[in-house]
Image (cartoon, coloured by chain):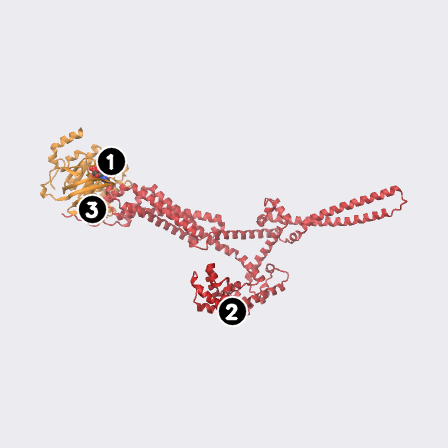
Amino acid sequence: MKLDVRQQVRLPLRRCVELVVSGIQFRLFRAAITVGIIALAVAFLMTMLTESFTAREVAGAIEERVAPREAMLTWVNRLSTGMTENEVNSLLLKAETDPDRAAELRHWGGLDQSEMEELVNVARRRDFYLGFFEEQPEGILREMVGRDRGDQVFRRLSDPERLEEFRLALPRATTQFPTDMDEFNSFLQHYQATAEHRQQIRKGHEQAISQLKEKFPDLRAVEILAEADDDLPDILEPLGFRMSSEQLEQVRREARLSLDVEQLNRLLTVRQVRARLAQRGAAGRIADVTQETLLREVRSKDGASWLISMVEGLLREHRDLVEQRDELSDRVEQLSEQTEEIRESVETLPAEAEQHEHEEAKQRLTQAETDLEAAMLEYDRISEDLRALEAAEPMLRDLDLSAERVSEVARHRLEQRQLADIETAVSQAAVRGGVLGFSTRAMWLIVVSLMVCIVGIANAMLMSVTERFKEIATMKCLGATDGFIMINFILESCFQGLAGGLIGAVLGLVLGLVRSWLNYGTLSLMQLPLVSVLAAAGATIGIGVVLSAMAAVYPARVAARLAPMEAMRIE
Amino acid sequence: MTETTQTSPPQSPAPEADRPVIIRTRGLQKHYKMGEVITKALQGIDIEIYRGEFLSVLGPSGSGKSTFFNMVGGLDSPTEGRVFIDEVDVAQLNAIELAFLRCRKIGYIFQTYNLVQYMTALENVTVPMAFAGADADRARERGMEILELVGLKERWFHKPIEMSGGQQQRVAIARSMANAPSILLCDEPTGNLDLQTGAEIHEILRRLNCEHGVTIICATHDHRLINIAHRIMWIRDGQIDRLAERNEVTIETGAIGGEENG
Ligand SMILES: Nc1ncnc2c1ncn2[C@@H]1O[C@H](COP(=O)(O)OP(=O)(O)O)[C@@H](O)[C@H]1O
Ligand SMILES: [Mg+2]
């Protein structure tokens, strides 16, 4: 009778899972450690991802919201300042997609279609080469092109000697030069050949600006935009500027806001206004009063009306003082005339006059002189008071805003400021670069935390294995293969990882949202990128499961290699 | 198998030459090395164990009983010598084949029962069946049958902590029988039990031996086990001190009993 030894059967995964699940229920506490660690790690990751995603969305939303103001500022700049070489080139790149910009450039440069195309082409290649030069470290750049930077580089390299110098230094560059030398040469020639056209464009633009100044001699560009009638585009067109009517609408609104903010800001130069604001409790001391203080104070209807009536009060005070001063000035004149008369009468009094008459005349003169002096003192005092208000008076009088408008302007400006703050916060979060918007430092932090995680889980699993030596050995006596024991432990860890991952993802999402809300305000919740966040949750849970599985490999090996005779041992 | 009744004392098996050998050991040695010290747990054991036999292994604590079991049960490999089960050299089997062997050919019963704490009696019994690839329903069915055999059918849903030591050991016996092995290795199965419960366990083992023809090798301190064994092997210091048929020993049981009492 021969013993029939065959290969032990391999358990289907389903049976393994069943066995693992029944075991987990029994070891809830031990499982809690792994679950907790994974939950923490996943929550950490999830928080960072949520924050990063919301930050990115918020950045987009902010861009949208500040776009009108930027458009206005761009227009102000175009209408008042000539272009640099750089600006011409970037406008040429824009002209590729924006027919209005193309038309402007053609107008100013007096260019035909093919000349324009050539310019755009050159601008594109220029951009390409500039990128290369910007990437080079300073020392190498110095060797290649001396002290020249930007467009100067291309002018310098038009000199064949300098070009040779550059060619020799080129192998030391840190990145590959984008094209071969022949192509670069051809670019330099084109660049040189089109330089005049770019110059023409700049001249044409400057002419347009000065023509505009002639048309609106007393106005700044903002004011032109703010006070524009609907026919402004038609006025601008002959000068080359192309402005659509929607753009006019937007730009005009922003320009007005900007001017009104200027008015409010100008009020702040008045000492009395600052003093009143401080008195009202908006700031501790007069020196602490800032633009922000004013805006915060007047953003409410109440505050705005207070501001208006305060300004009116100051104007009234000024008017009263002027009146008083004028009255006093009349009185001083009158008194000095009287004094003069009395003095004359005293001098012309005949010597034979009675003694008492002399006495009386002298007394009257003294009296008149005292009155005059008093009146002049009073006049000086009033003038002094007035001088303090006099300088402020034009600004006070200029304020032509209603209370509603004041609060509207203040609110708008405060929002813009807040957006700017958020933008800084967002860019500090480095959302624009790195993997998934993480900085290198954050990446390191994540990697290290995950390593710590693996070690923690491995430790907990190892303890679990040690505790279950006897059980494992018994299982092996009953026919468990090493592979089953291995899979058993890894599966168990995976389940714990899954549970921890789920908990962590929810926790992390909540935490991330709260943090974004604290950093970026309600804007972040409005911009919640649901799909990305869900994808991130899935991914982080996956990471949790994989981590747990990885951490379980070593303990599972220890378990699998356990000798079955351990089951016999009696402690 | 010779005919036996429950009450009659065990019959001596047929003469040696005719009896089929199920386990054969040749020069079995096991040395444990702990640092500088080498413990010679087994120092050359040669024995043939016959199919259907009930062999008791007696010896003081530390004499090498458990070590002998580990070798014979394919749980550990000897330092020297060979173990043949059905003439198959255990040393020639790979890990997967060993698992197969442990799963279906040999049943193990431990002094500490070694039940899986989070499983019910039935679940414990079905574990080896699961490892053998049986489907769950079939395993449960057969599990209940075996539990009935050890008298615990009514308690199939109890967890080990809800059972007495004797009951746990009965569940362990049921588990060892799950895949109907031909060999049962019991390492001091009654070591943790009182006399009465121990006797119950002995009775179950005896029945398994008689009715199911299972070869039983049972290490023990308990001299009463001699009464149901066919042969007794005494081990001392890792060597066979004495090997005797049941009927050769009966005369001396009194003396041994006296030893026990004294
Ligand atoms: N894993 C081991 N490592 C070292 N020594 C061991 C080991 N197992 C048993 N021994 C030693 O081998 C000898 C025999 O032990 P064992 O077979 O357990 O005896 P028994 O079961 O008869 O009490 C003892 O001296 C014991 O200390
Ligand atoms: Mg022992």
> Which chain wears orange?
B
For the residue labelled by badge 2, is the local secondary structure a helix, a strand or a loop? helix
Label 2 packing within 10 angstroms: few (<14), some (14-19), many (20+): some
The chain carrying label 1 is B
Task: Give how far apart the Cα atoms at labels 2 and 3 are.
Answer: 90 Å
From the top left corner, tell me how far across and down residue A109 is, in percent: 55, 68
- Going by the numbered disc 1, the residue's amino acid type is Gly
Q: Nearer the viewer, mark 1 or mark 3?
A: 3
Q: Establish whether ligand 1 lies closer than 8 Å to the Cβ of label 2.
A: no
Same chain check for tags 2 and 3: no
Q: Chain A is drawn in which colour?
A: red
- In-image side of B141 versus A352 (left or right): left
The chain carrying label 2 is A
From the top left corner, tell me how far across and down residue A315 is, in percent: 67, 50
- Which one is in front, A16 or B94? B94
- In-image side of B143 versus A78 (left or right): left
- Going by the numbered disc 3, the residue's amino acid type is Leu
From the top left corner, tell me how far across and down residue B195 is, in percent: 20, 32
- Which one is in front, B11 or B137? B11
Q: Name the residue under label 2.
A: A194
- In-image side of A478 versus A276 (left or right): left
Label 1 packing within 10 angstroms: few (<14), some (14-19), many (20+): some
**Which residue is at 79% across, 45% downward?**
A369
